[in-house]
Every structure is written in structure tokens, then in C-alpha cells.
Amino acid sequence: DPREKERRIKTKKNGLYALREMKEKRYGRCVVVLILIIKHDWRYQVPP
């Protein structure tokens, strides 16, 4: 299923973004991204 694959790529990208935010001690945004990953609501794309 191509949609499933696309979602996995987005999940990975957003996960990496969350980790980077965590390293820079910006926990607020990191938590938001993690919640989105859990909910799989990809209408919201995190900025690069």
C-alpha cells in the first residue's frame, strides 16, 4: 500500500525532527510531534 509507505516515511522524518528538538532542549515542540506520531495525524507536517 503506497499510502502506508508514505506515512512511514513521514513518521520517520517527524521522529528525527522530534529527536533534534529534544537535543536542543525544546521539549514543547518535541512533545507535540510525538503526540502527532502516536495519533498519525499527518495533516500537520512539521517544519524541516
Image: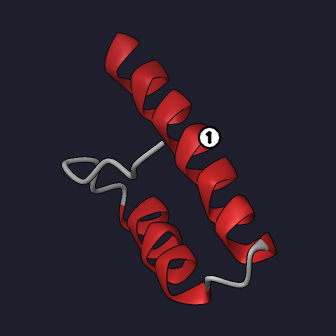
Q: Nearer the viewer, residue 35 or 30?
A: 30
Tell me which residue sits at (42%, 23%) in the image: 6
Residue 1 left/right relative to 34? left
Helix, strand or loop under label 1: helix
Residue 7 visible in the shown view:
yes
Residue 34 left/right relative to 24? left
Tell me which residue sits at (47%, 36%) in the image: 10
The N terminus is located in which quarter? top left
Q: Nearer the viewer, residue 22 or 3?
A: 22
Q: Position of residue 30 (x, y in %)?
A: 56, 75
Q: Residue furthest right?
A: 23
Q: Residue furthest top?
A: 2
Which amino acid lies under the numbered mark 1 shown in the image of this protein? Lys
34 to 44, vertically: above or below: below
Q: Position of residue 14 (x, y in %)?
A: 53, 49
Count of numbered marks: 1
The residue carrying mark 1 is 12
Residue 44 left/right relative to 23? left
